[in-house]
Image (cartoon, grey):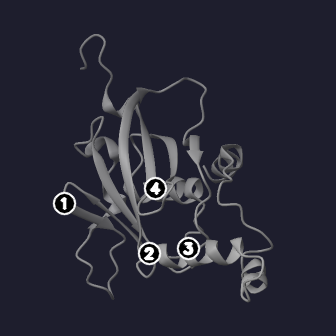
């Protein structure tokens, strides 16, 4: 039994800052998720908060251990992400772990445990509380492809600009981020 003033980890809400590495200025999100979430379940709020579509493989590295979706056809040597919860990992405030999405584009994310908070009665989790800048479009071609993409969109005379505008669905604002839109998606999924 927990002592007075201490909370059990199963009641904990993990406030995570997820930063897409190698993009300047940074693209990041702050999310709050329950400690009972498995790493497999954490994948969905990460995808939704960042703006990814979820069509590629992913993997976590936590204290040197790799977690993902074991595939019988692929010997990736990973632990099953659905068998470990956040509150069973030795995570505490200021600890960082890593998440990679799309092994082709190799989108590297750093996840910082900012705080472990008490659960707020009546509050829906997971929730995205803040973020900055738009996530690169899916399949843009990694960090370098994203830089090229932004350069093309920024040059009204570039011969590929119209093609890129069509590919991205008509427009792209690298500074845009709407946490309310993310939270609507999260509420519909959880």
Q: Nearer the viewer, residue 4 or 137?
A: 137
Residue picked out by circle 2: 57
| Mark 3 or 4, nearer chain start | 4
Q: Nearer the viewer, residue 155 or 49?
A: 155
Q: Which mark is residue 139?
A: none
Callout 1: SS:
loop
Q: Report the residue marked by disc 1.
A: 64
Q: Is residue 90 left or right of residue 126?
A: left
Which residue matches tag 4? 41
Q: Residues within 10 Å of mark 2 (few under 14, many from 20)?
A: few
Name the front one of labels 3 and 4. 3
Question: Where 166 falls versus 29 (above or below)?
Answer: below
Q: What's the CA distance linking mark 3 and mark 4?
A: 28 Å
Determine whether the residue tagged by mark 3 lies in a helix, strand or loop: helix
Q: CA distance from mark 4 to mark 2?
A: 14 Å
CB contact under 8 Å: marks 3 and 4: no
Q: Quadrant of the N terminus?
A: top left
Q: Looking at the image, is mark 1 or mark 3 nearer the viewer? A: 3
């Amino acid at each position: 039994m927990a002592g007075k003033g201490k909370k059990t980890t199963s009641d904990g809400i993990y406030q995570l800052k997820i930063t897409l590495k190698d993009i300047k200025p940074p693209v990041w999100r702050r999310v709050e998720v329950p400690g009972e979430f498995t790493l497999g379940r954490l994948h969905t709020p990460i995808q939704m908060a960042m703006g990814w579509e979820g069509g590629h493989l992913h993997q976590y590295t936590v204290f040197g251990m790799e977690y993902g979706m074991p595939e019988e056809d692929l010997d990736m040597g990973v632990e099953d992400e659905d068998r470990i919860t956040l509150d069973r990992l030795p995570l505490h405030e200021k600890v960082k772990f890593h998440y990679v999405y799309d092994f082709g584009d190799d989108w590297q994310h750093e996840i910082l445990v900012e705080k472990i908070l008490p659960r707020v009665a009546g509050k829906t989790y997971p929730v995205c509380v803040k973020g900055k800048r738009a996530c690169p479009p899916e399949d843009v071609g990694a960090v370098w492809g994203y830089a090229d993409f932004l350069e093309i969109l920024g040059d009204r005379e570039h011969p590929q600009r119209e093609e890129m505008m069509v590919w991205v669905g008509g427009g792209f604002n690298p500074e845009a981020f709407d946490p309310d839109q993310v939270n609507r998606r999260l509420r519909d999924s959880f």
